[in-house]
Amino acid sequence: MNGKRVLISGASIAGPALALWLGRAGFDVTVVERATSFREGGGAVDYRGAVHLTVLARMGILDTLRGLDTAMGEQVVVDEAGREAVRLPASFMSGELEVTRGDLARTIYEAGLAHARYVFGDSIRTLTEHADGVTVEFEQGGTEEFDLVVGADGMHSVTRRLAFGEESEFRRDSGYFFATFSTQAPASLGLRDSGVLWNVPGRMVGLSNTLGEDGAMLVFHDPGLRYDHRDIAGQRAIVQQHFGDAGWEVPGVLSTMWSAPDFYFDSLSQVVMDRWSNGRVVLLGDAAWAPAPGGMGNGLAVVGAYVLAGELAMAPDHATAFARYEERMRPYVTTCQKQGKGAGPFLAPPTAKKLKQRNRIYRVLCSRLMRSLFNRLTTKAAEAIDLPDYPMSGVPRAAGVDLLPQS
């Protein structure tokens, strides 16, 4: 199918990864992004197992990302007064490769710049499918014709709303919310390539130092909360409301939130859909299957982009490609969503009893015997797909490029 005009909505992780592959395969690719510029920032993301690392190697970016590895060390869980409750080893949180979200996004974006046209500060207004393609009207004016449209625009996907229905039909909320932003961790904590997690029932504050930069992640439970995902000032006020009475180092963390340029807030939710394509429109990444933390969302994003591009490159038509893409990815997504489903209650247990139970589980999992078992189980989930070797133009197969066993 090469030579087709493809519009990708979303320039975070999944969209640029798909653009790289489709461009290499000979497609004419345009990426449109609502943000006015490439978005930096974000917390650390990790990759586990041969499937994740092989896709990154085939993209030609694995060595670059290894050079950007956070080398994150231990993370200490403390109680309300700041006393150590349990110490988590690096492998528990960081996988085999951990990089910041900003470093990952920029690496993929720059690797694919030669293969796609990027348009920032715009978004899709309407989609009108016809026999030969899709007419796309843009928010900033003008229309263009494309053969295919891909929604890689996140959990609050405009593409999904236009082609499939309202977000409420597909989003499954947990009652938990999170915020991330850069901060200045207190020197007294002594954080250097390490982190600390503070918990009280229903709330968590995580502070970490990664590559010399400090970051915060706050998680809280509020099943009745409603919010506007584009109202940043309102989101900051929500976080202040839920943590304003907290002790420990939280007041100082909150004081830096108001000016943090990379503040990000959202719900810990999953997207569950019966199908990911409708005619000439298909969804990818969180727009199709947001798995929540612990569900390996960034691994799913790059693997999904590779599979979708490979099937489009091989199939005689888009309908066949979309069907094969879903057939390959659906069991993998289901496995990862199952693993991520309980992320909120595990990060911020809602009661004192459940918090004690969670800490006991941490201690068991961090024992030498169980640590090995835990790592095997998470890697097993990350590798729960038979990854094809698509004949797309890409990085030459040099020794050591592929980490999957050869059949």
Image (spheres, grey):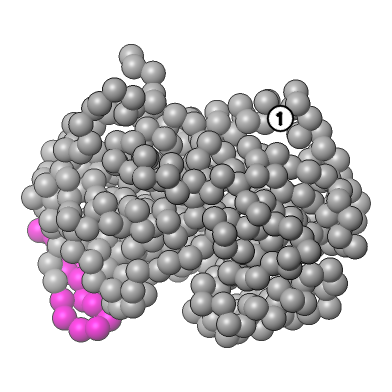
Vertical position of residue 38 compared to residue 272: above or below: below
Q: Position of residue 354 (x, y in %)?
A: 86, 50
Q: Residue at x 29, y 41 (%)?
A: 59
| Residues rendered magenta in the picture | 127-143
Q: Quadrant of residue 214?
A: bottom right
Q: Is residue 5 magenta?
A: no
Residue position for label 1: 371
Q: Quadrant of the N terminus?
A: top left
Residue 176 visible in the shown view: no
Q: Position of residue 278 (x, y in %)?
A: 30, 55
Q: Main secondary structure of the magenta part?
A: strand
Q: Residue at x 67, y 51 (%)?
A: 194
- The reply, left or right, for residue 101 in relation to residue 87 is left
Q: Is residue 136 magenta?
A: yes
Q: Amino acid at mark 1?
A: Arg
Q: Residue at x 71, y 73 (%)?
A: 253
Nearer to me, 373 or 273: 373
Nearer to me, 297 or 370: 370
Q: Position of residue 359 (x, y in %)?
A: 83, 45
- The reply, left or right, for residue 297 in relation to residue 64 is right
Q: Residue at x 63, y 58 (%)?
A: 209
